[in-house]
Image (cartoon, rainbow, N blue to C red):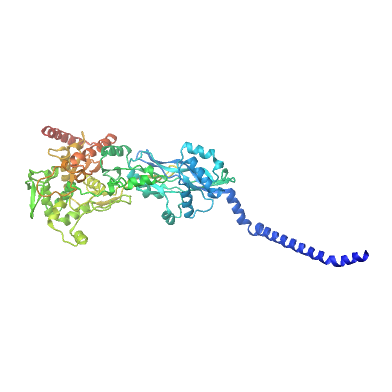
Amino acid sequence: MARANRWYGSTASPRFELRLKLVATFMFVALAGIGARLYYLQIVSTKQLSELADRNRIRTLRVAAPRGLVFDRHHRVLVDTRPSFDAVMVPEDSTNLTATIKNLERYLGGDHFADKVAEAEDEGRPAFEPITVKERLDWGQIVALETHQLELPGVSLEVTPRRHYLYGSLAAHLLGYVGEVNRQDLAKLPDYHVGDEIGRFGLERGLENSLRGAAGGRQIEVDAVGRRLRVLGEVPEQPGRNVILTIDFDVQQAAEQALGSRTGAVVALDPNNGEIIAMASHPSFDPNSFSGGINLATWRSLSASPDHPLEDRAIQGVYPPGSTFKLVDSIAALQEKAITPTTVFNCPGGLWYGNREYRCWRKEGHGDVALHRAIVQSCDVYFYEVGLRLGVDRLAYWADQLGLGRHSGVPLGEEKVGLIPSSAWKRKRFGERWYPAETLSVAIGQGYVGVTPLQMAQLAAEIANGGIRYQPHFVRQIIGADGRVLENVKPVVEARLKVDPNVLAMIRDAMADVVNGAGGTAHRAQLEHITVCGKTGTAQVVKEAQGDRVKEENLPERYRDHGWFVAFAPKEQPQIAVACVIEHGGHGGSSAAPVVHDVMAKFFELYPPKVTPAAAKLQEALDSDRDDNQRSD
C-alpha cells in the first residue's frame, strides 16, 4: 500500500500542479484584465464617462429669448410675444422610437413626427438635443401629453415664445413677419440655433438686431424616460429691445378701412420730419401665419395668388404717375424759365405731333389756358407743350431732384426705385435714340415713367415744406427691456431742393384750387375749415388706339386706369402729406381722393391744425370761395 501511495504521489502530483498553474494563470490574467479595465474606467476615462453619465441624467436646455415689443407712436402695443406650448422629443430617451412616434400620432394627431425627427438628424443635431415635433398645442393636446407621459418616453412639454401680431393684417407689410431659421441662416449666423425665429420681412427683418434678445439656459435633472425632475441651475434670457414707431394706429386703421377691398396703397408722411404716419397696402396677409412656421397650403395660397398679397405696394408697387407728374413739369418749367405763370397754350382737345394726335382727357378741350388753370383742370395739351419745351433730359433731372426714380432711404430692404427715363437711359437700355414724341407721354406721367406711392408722398411733402426731402422713417425710439431710452431717431435731410420759393408757392396755390376751386378735379377730398392741397392723376394701363375713346366702364377691370391722388394739408402750415393709388380704380378724383379724405379727416380729428391769425383769415376767405364754387357747380 505504501508503495502504491508513493507511486500515486509520484505520478499524480505533476498533473495537479499543472492544473493549478493553469487556473492560477487564468485567474491572474482575468484579474489583470479587470484591473486594467477598472483603471481605464476610473482613471483614464473618468472625465469622459462622468460627462456621459451627467448628459444622460442632467440636460442643458437653451431658453429662447422673447423678441422686443413693437408700439405705435402713442405706446399702444402692435406686436408682442406670447407663450406657445410645444411638444419636444429627445429620441435618445426612447427605447422604442417607432412606438413612441405612433403614440404621438394617436394622442396629438398628425403623421409628420417621423419626418421631423429624420430632418433634425439630417441637419446634424447633437445627441440629447430636443426636437420640436408639434407647436402650439391646444388644451386637449396638453392634457393628452401629460396624462400619457409613460407611453411617450423622451417627449415633454416646452413653453417657447412666439411672435404675435395683435391686429392681424393691420400694417402687415410694414411690420413684416418672422420665420424659423433654416440651414442657410445657420451657416451664416453662428449665434442662431435650430428653432430660433428670425425676421424675414419688413420691420422684423430691418430691426432684427434690436428686436432679437439673447438666449439663456437651464440645467435640469431628468429621469430614465427624460421627464424633468428639478432645475439645477439657470442663466436667464435677455428679452429684445422694444421699438416705438411713428405709426399712428388710428390713422393706419383709417387708411386700411378707406382702401377697403380695393387693390392699392396709401402712404401718409409728416412733411416736417419724414415720419411715416401710416403706410397701408392691400390686399394684405396675416403675419401670425408665419410665426412658428407657415404650413404649405397657406404659403402656396399667398405666394401663388394673382393678387400678390405679399407685395408691399407702398414701396414695391411701381406705377405710371399719370397727371400727378404735372407737378414735376410745372416746377421744372418755371425753374428752367421754359414758361412763365402767364404763358398760355390753346387746348382744342388734342395736340397733333407728327402723324398722330395726342389727346387731352377733355374731349372738347380747355381753350386758352395758363399754368394755374392747367394744373387745376389737369389739361394734358398744356403739359404736352411744356414737355416739348423742356425735353426729356431736363424733365428727368428735376424728377430726380424731387426724389423720383431713386431709393427713398426708408429702412426696408425690399424697396423698388421705379424709373425716370432719359435719352442716356434709352441708349443704354435699348441702344436707340430718344424721340421727341416720347417726351409727350413722359410729360403726363405715362410711357416709361414708373414711381412708387412712397415717392409720391415725398413729392407732396417737399412741395408742402418748401423743398426739403426728408428720409422717410417709421421708428421714433428704441427702448431697453428696463424702460430706458437707448436711441432717439432724429430726422435725416436727404436733400434741399434748389428752387425759387415763389415757384413752390404758385404750385401750392394751384393744388389748393384742385381740391377747393371751381373746375378742380378733387372736390371729394375737401375738409371743412381745412385747406387741402392736392393733385389727381389717372394712369393708363393700356394705350388707347386712334379713333373713338373707349368708356372706362366698358373695359375689363384689368385694363382700367389706375387712380392717383397726392395731397397735403393744411395749406399754410402743413402737418400731413398723403399719396394714394388705386389699381384699376379709374379717375383719381373719384377713386383715390376719397381715400385721402378719410385719412386726413381722422388725422385732423386726432391732431387739430395749428391755426395762426393770418392762416385763419386766409382759411375764411378760402371757405367763402369754396362755398361760392360749390353753389356754381
Q: Between residue 533 and residue 420, name the one nearer to us.
A: 420
Residue 337 visible, this orientation: no
Q: Position of residue 394 (x, y in %)?
A: 17, 56
- The outermost residue toward the right is 2
Q: Quadrant of residue 461?
A: top left
In screen coordinates, is 290 left or right of 311?
Answer: right
Q: Position of residue 518 (x, y in %)?
A: 12, 37
In screen coordinates, is 205 left or right of 16?
Answer: left
Q: Between residue 139 and residue 282, name the one nearer to us.
A: 139
In screen coordinates, is 111 left or right of 96?
Answer: left
Q: Position of residue 385 (x, y in %)?
A: 10, 51
Q: Position of residue 313 (x, y in %)?
A: 28, 46
Q: Against 315, is 29 above or below?
A: below
Q: Between residue 68 and residue 308, name the one nearer to us.
A: 308
In screen coordinates, is 42 left or right of 151?
Answer: right
Q: Between residue 471 and residue 442, name the one nearer to us.
A: 442
Residue under the point 36% across and 43% down: 287
Residue under the point 46% across and 53% down: 191
Report the number of numbered marks: 0
Residue 494 visible, this orientation: yes
Q: Quadrant of the N terminus?
A: bottom right
